[in-house]
Each structure stands twice: as structure tokens, then as C-alpha cells.
């Protein structure tokens, strides 16, 4: 099993930051990711994009983190946006009927195009 890592990439929009988790977002990794989300929010980043292209699994703990974070961010005028969702994870979201709860995009260009 590969070790969980997360790269955080700020983009030009000062309110937005991109998280790139790699590995499994499980009961061990979810609190680590939550700490990074909280740090971003404390720094004024109320729009978080999570690039899931290198994520191979999301446990119930990881899903709980995403659902809780999207609610917190939206309550503060922001959003949590999922990008590049692998098919296995998308299938799980559909099975659990949570896929419509998240805004999803395929690329940052797609996000930019919807804001013009």
C-alpha cells in the first residue's frame, strides 16, 4: 500500500486552493487531510478543489470529511469541488447517492470557463 501524501497548490484566485491527495483517504489519512483543509480555511481559502486523480480509495471516514467540509465551506460562501474523480470512486459515490452533493469538474480550465 502506498503512503498517503497530499500536495497543496494555491492558484491565482486567492480564495482557491487545490489539494492533490495521493493514495487512500482512509481513517488514518482523513484526519491529516482535515488538518490541511482547516489550515487552508484559516488562511482564507474558502474554495477548495480536490484533485482525486491520484486517489485510489476513499473510506467512510474520508467521505465524512468531504461531506462535512463541503457543508462548512458553503456555509461560509465557499465550496468544495471535486476534480478528476476515478471511476471506482465515482461508482462508490453513486452507490451511496452522494454524487449530486458535490460539484465536480474535469479540469481547472472547466472551472475557469464556468466563471466567465
Image (cartoon, rainbow, N blue to C red):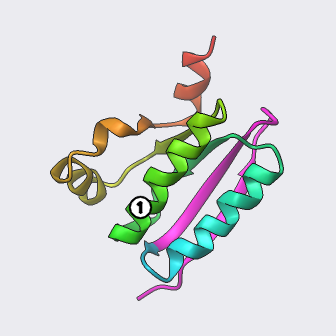
Whether residue 58 is visible to the viewer of this picture, yes or no, is no
- Majority secondary structure of magenta residues: strand
Location of residue 8 (image quadrant): bottom right
Location of residue 101 (image quadrant): top left
Q: Residue at x 61, y 16 (%)?
A: 115
Circle 1: is it few (<14), some (14-19), or many (20+) Cα within 10 Å?
A: few
Q: Residue at x 29, y 42 (%)?
A: 99
- Part of the protein shown in magenta: 1-23
- The one nearer the camera, 77 or 29, is 77
The residue labelled by disc 1 is 64
Quadrant where the image shows the N terminus: bottom left
Percent across and percent down for residue 73 are 60, 41
Percent across and percent down for residue 71 are 51, 43
Whether residue 70 is visible to the viewer of this picture, yes or no, is yes
In the image, residue 10 above or below residue 77: below
Q: Residue at x 43, y 66 (%)?
A: 62
Magenta span has 80? no
Percent across and percent down for residue 29 are 52, 77
Quadrant where the image shows the C terminus: top right
Amino acid at each position: 500500500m502506498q503512503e498517503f501524501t497530499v500536495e497543496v497548490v494555491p492558484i491565482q484566485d486567492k480564495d482557491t486552493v487545490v489539494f492533490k491527495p495521493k493514495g487512500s483517504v482512509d481513517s488514518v489519512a482523513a484526519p491529516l487531510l482535515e488538518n490541511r483543509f482547516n489550515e487552508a480555511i484559516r488562511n482564507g481559502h474558502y474554495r477548495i478543489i480536490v484533485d482525486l486523480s491520484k486517489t485510489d480509495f476513499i473510506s467512510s471516514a474520508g467521505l465524512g470529511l468531504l461531506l462535512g467540509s463541503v457543508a462548512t465551506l458553503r456555509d461560509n460562501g465557499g465550496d468544495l469541488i471535486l476534480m478528476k474523480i476515478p471511476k471506482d470512486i465515482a461508482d462508490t459515490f453513486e452507490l451511496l447517492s452522494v454524487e449530486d452533493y458535490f460539484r465536480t469538474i474535469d479540469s481547472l480550465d472547466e472551472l475557469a470557463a464556468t466563471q466567465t
